[in-house]
């Protein structure tokens, strides 16, 4: 009897859990007669879900890899500006830090390398340096040992960004095991977030494939597979969504009210988020005085454990009900705050039982359109900004917003005075907005969205048959 091909699903961090551990991805892979093993670098114990896993015990990169990685990002952004004559790529840079001696040295070396290597030749040298350094690590040699023992037919990396993915993929390359990586998010490619290099690449859409080949011209088109992303699949399994009665009872909501969702951002993306939430709460109070029966469900950014919303939540508790995302803090670092399977069900129920979502430019627009609900984007600066040089204008200049087919794909809130009118429009006449949002969804994610995992497994099967 022919043995099943063994597939290693590399989880270099918790980012891939939602897409590849909590979706139907694993079930479909087993039905396709694959032997799945999660190569797990997260603190989450996947055996509790009934999965086979091999824990990565010592994922320590070379001390210089981070500096080379940061230089690579700077160089790629420099080259993108040179090729496009577009300064938007400067907005993807993080500020250099000099508040300690170690950080000052790293920042200075990164700047020097990016200055002296800002050419295709220089970029190639930096890429080679990263690989050379990682092959010297104990981590790399441990990965070699694991792969030599397990002999998988394929290694699939769930996220292109983490440094901890470099060594395992290099070890697979050394042994002639084909590899692929999934581009995690719709905005990742313009940001120069590619850290790993693999034999094949899985992307969300034809647009993302075009972006990938533009930003990384050394890649071959036939090695890029358009699959969509599993992150939207759960929205289409209506049988698993909590009923409105149970949802309202569990989270102390009024069954007779209609709710909108305010979806929070992290503090870096939106430092003024509490003020925006307050503005929405003021508008909802005004609407209720006019005879509406509305409330706000507040879903904070899952990695934001700050107290910055506390005063607003207390002052407007008559209209705001916070529902905390079901993520778990398993360690001390931000990358050890991990999603749970229960949070997928919670998010789906929240979307299903709210009328619309208000946020600052997030991909929640696509989660909501999957439920035929509209999204409103905040598009104004508050009077008293936490960070004086921060502005919403910076957010909407990002490259990924250029994929919007027209401006009517969302409702735009251009001032606090408009919020009540926009909410009324969103809950009464949203059809045109939903129609345009669906067109946008079709641009950024391969359709039908509920078949992404199937397309990924089809691609893996195709690759294995060729290798």
Image (cartoon, helix red, strand yellow):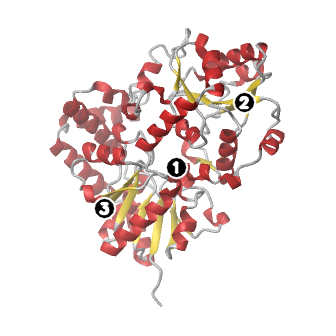
Secondary structure under tag 2 reads strand
Rendering quarter of residue 465: bottom left
Secondary structure under tag 1 reads helix
Depth check: 209 or 218 in front? Answer: 209
Q: Nearer the viewer, mark 1 or mark 2?
A: 2
Residue depicted at x 22% and y 36%:
79
Sequence-first disc among 1 and 2 = 1
Q: What label does residue 199 carry, if any?
A: 3
Relative to 57, residue 337 above or below:
above
Depth check: 390 or 247 in front? Answer: 247
Neighbour tally class for label 2: few under 14, some 14-19, many 20 plus, Cα within 10 Å: many
3D distance between C-alphas at marks 3 and 1: 21 Å
Q: Position of residue 395 (x, y in %)?
A: 44, 25
Q: Which residue in the structure is indicated by mark 1?
A: 15
Q: Is residue 324 left or right of residue 229?
A: right
Neighbour tally class for label 1: few under 14, some 14-19, many 20 plus, Cα within 10 Å: many
Q: Nearer the viewer, mark 2 or mark 3?
A: 2
Depth check: 187 or 413 in front? Answer: 413
Q: What label does residue 259 carry, if any?
A: 2
Residue depicted at x 20% and y 37%:
118
Sequence-first disc among 2 and 3 = 3
Residue depicted at x 34% and y 44%:
207
**Farthest-out residue, bottom:** 1
Residue 385 shows in the view = yes
């Amino acid at each position: 009897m022919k043995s099943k091909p063994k597939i290693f699903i590399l989880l270099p961090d918790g980012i891939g859990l939602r897409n590849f551990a909590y979706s139907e991805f694993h079930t479909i892979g087993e039905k396709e007669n694959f032997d799945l093993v999660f190569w797990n670098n997260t603190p989450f114990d996947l055996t509790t879900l009934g999965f086979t896993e091999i824990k990565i015990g010592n994922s320590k990169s070379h001390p210089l890899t981070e500096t080379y990685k940061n230089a690579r990002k700077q160089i790629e952004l420099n080259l993108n500006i040179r090729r496009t004559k577009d300064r938007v790529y400067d907005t993807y840079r993080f500020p250099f830090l000099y508040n300690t001696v170690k950080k000052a040295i790293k920042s200075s070396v990164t700047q020097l390398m990016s200055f002296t290597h800002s050419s295709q030749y220089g970029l190639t040298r930096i890429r080679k340096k990263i690989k050379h350094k990682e092959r010297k690590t104990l981590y790399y040699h441990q990965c070699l040992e694991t792969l030599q023992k397990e002999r998988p037919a394929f290694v699939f990396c769930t996220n292109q960004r983490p440094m901890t993915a470099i060594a395992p993929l290099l070890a697979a390359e050394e042994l002639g095991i084909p590899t692929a990586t999934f581009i995690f998010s719709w905005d990742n490619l313009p940001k120069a977030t590619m850290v790993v290099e693999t034999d094949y690449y899985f992307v969300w859409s034809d647009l993302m494939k075009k972006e990938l080949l533009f930003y990384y011209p050394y890649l071959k088109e036939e090695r890029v597979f358009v699959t969509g992303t599993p992150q939207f699949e759960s929205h289409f399994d209506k049988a698993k969504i909590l009923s409105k009665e149970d949802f309202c009872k569990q989270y102390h909501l009024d069954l007779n009210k209609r709710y909108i969702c305010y979806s929070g951002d992290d503090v870096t993306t939106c430092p003024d988020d509490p003020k925006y939430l307050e503005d929405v709460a003021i508008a909802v109070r005004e609407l209720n005085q006019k005879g509406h029966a509305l409330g706000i469900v507040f879903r904070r950014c899952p990695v934001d454990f700050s107290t910055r919303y506390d005063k607003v939540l207390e002052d407007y508790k008559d209209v705001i009900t916070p529902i905390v995302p079901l993520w778990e803090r398993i360690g001390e670092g931000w990358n050890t705050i991990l999603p749970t399977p229960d949070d997928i069900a919670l998010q789906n129920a929240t979307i299903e039982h709210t009328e619309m979502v208000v946020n600052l430019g997030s991909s929640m627009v696509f989660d909501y359109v999957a439920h035929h609900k509209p999204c409103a984007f905040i598009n104004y600066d508050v009077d008293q900004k936490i960070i004086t040089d921060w502005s919403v204008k910076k957010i909407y200049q990002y490259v990924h917003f250029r994929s919007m087919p027209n401006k009517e794909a969302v409702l735009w809130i251009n001032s606090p005075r408009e919020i009540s009118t926009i909410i009324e429009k969103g809950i009464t006449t949203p059809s045109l907005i939903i129609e345009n949002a669906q067109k946008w969804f079709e641009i950024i994610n391969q359709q039908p969205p509920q078949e992404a995992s199937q397309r990924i497994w089809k691609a893996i099967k195709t690759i294995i048959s060729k290798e």
